[in-house]
Amino acid sequence: MHGRTESPSETAPEATWPEDIFAILQRFDVRQVPYVPDAGHSQLIERVLGASSMRAVPLTTEEEGVALLAGAWAGGQRGVLLMQSSGVGNCVNMFSLTQIFRFPFLTLVTMRGEWGEFNPWQVPMGSSTAGVFELSGIKVLRASSPDEVREVVEAAAGQAYNACVPTAVLLSQRLIGAKVFTK
Amino acid sequence: MSKATLLERRSVVASLLAERKETIVVGGLGASTYDIAAAGDHDRNLYLWGAMGGAVMIGLGIALAQPKLPVVVITGDGEMLMGIGSLATVGLQSPRNFTIVVLDNEVYGETGGQASHTAATVDLVGVARACGIADSRAIATLADVEAFAQGMQDVFCGPRFASIKIDSANLERVLSNRDGSFILNRIRGSLGFGPI
């Protein structure tokens, strides 16, 4: 949907940080993984689709994922929402559920609209992503380099699942790489 | 169908839930939540007072987590329309234990009775079927509601979707509990899960 490279042949060698995230999700017994596809999450989504303990749930819009995770918790399961920064604005009213239900909410957001962005249409939402979360009562953590992803996601999962602190991790475009647009 | 034959919403919901047994019930924002409360408070009722458009997805999350229990969402046409894409998501997941019931009065009753899309153009049964929910039907009689209520107990042949055209009378509100944390933890408790 939002491919960062124009063809698979241009894809960089597999990064290790998505593997770090996957291992953390497994360790925290995450069972439902709603997502709207993003190239920055593609490696993690592949791992989730191949994991028998996890249910990948493709969404039509990101707010569905917030509601799904509330239901998952009501039914006794943890989940995590994977999305791109442009999807965060789609969720705003549904974020109310994190305060109303006080359920463990964790979302991992790949950033667009920063760090060498080519597409100006990504910039407005990318610029307000952290602010939207904060105004919605959701704590924001950020990882900008591969070697800090594990520590940041672990801290986020810990406070979300152990303390019911709704938390978003922003995975910087600097980490993922700006999408290359070629003719 | 003439308006005179439209069903009355409280008796529809009372009939749906009369033999609910282990069923978990999610009520959409608005009159559906009052109808469910009117049918009797229950540990496994999840009442929504907001999050419009989220009822089906909350139900889906529960249904995926509890595949052996019947999970039913009862909501209105306006709430369903706001989350219309969630029917596509449900069709893709196809949880066998999941049922969606729309009480369709063709108006936004909570806000003054403005017409909804179903009054003129939208066929929700057709939408649900096109989204991959093969067992999608319109229900027009109380006898069919009763038969459908029995079918809801099945956890092997869903998902299923029903649109029930009801009259648009504004009934006295029956106010359910609205403390979300309490409601959620009460359901979890009934399933054997404690607080964090």
Image (cartoon, grey):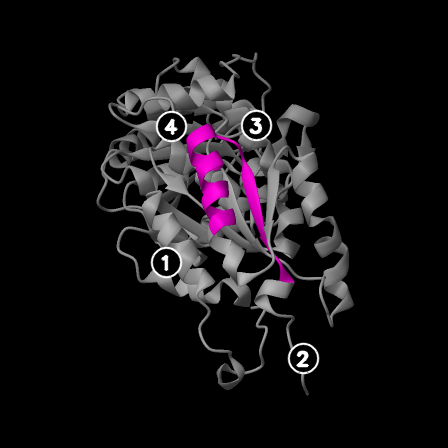
| Residue sitting at x 34%, y 33% | A75
| Residue B29, quarter of the rendered image | top right
| Residue at mark 4: chain | B
Between marks 4 and 3, how big is the CA–CA gap?
21 Å
Q: Are marks 4 and 3 in contact (CB under 8 Å)?
A: no
Precedes in sequence: disc 1 or disc 2: 1
Tag of residue A99: 3
Q: Chain of mark 1?
A: A
Residue at the spot x=32%, y=43% of the render? A29
Residue B151 lies, with reference to residue A61, above or below; the image says above
Q: Which residues are magenta?
A: A151-173
Q: Which residue is mark 2?
A: A181
Which amino acid lies under the numbered mark 4 shown in the image of this protein?
Val
Q: Marks 4 and 1: same chain?
A: no
Mark 4, residue position = B25
Cα distance between the residues tagged 1 and 2 = 28 Å
Q: Amino acid at mark 2?
A: Phe
Q: Nearer the viewer, residue B64 or B21?
A: B64
Which amino acid, mark 3? Gln
Query: Residue extending furthest front?
Result: A147
Instruction: Give the spatial CA distance, label 4 vs label 2.
Output: 48 Å
On the picture, is A48 further left or further right than A149?
left
Tell me if residue B174 comes above or below residue A37 in the rendering: above
| Secondary structure found at label 4 | strand
Q: Residues within 10 Å of mark 3 (few under 14, many from 20)?
A: some
Q: Is residue B164 visible?
A: no
What quarter of the picture does the C terminus of chain B occupy?
top left
Q: Residue at x 44, y 73 (%)?
A: A14
Foreground pick, B31 / B144: B31
Q: Residue at 46% across / 53% down in the picture? A: A150
Whichever of labels 3 and 1 marks the residue nearer the N terminus, that label is 1
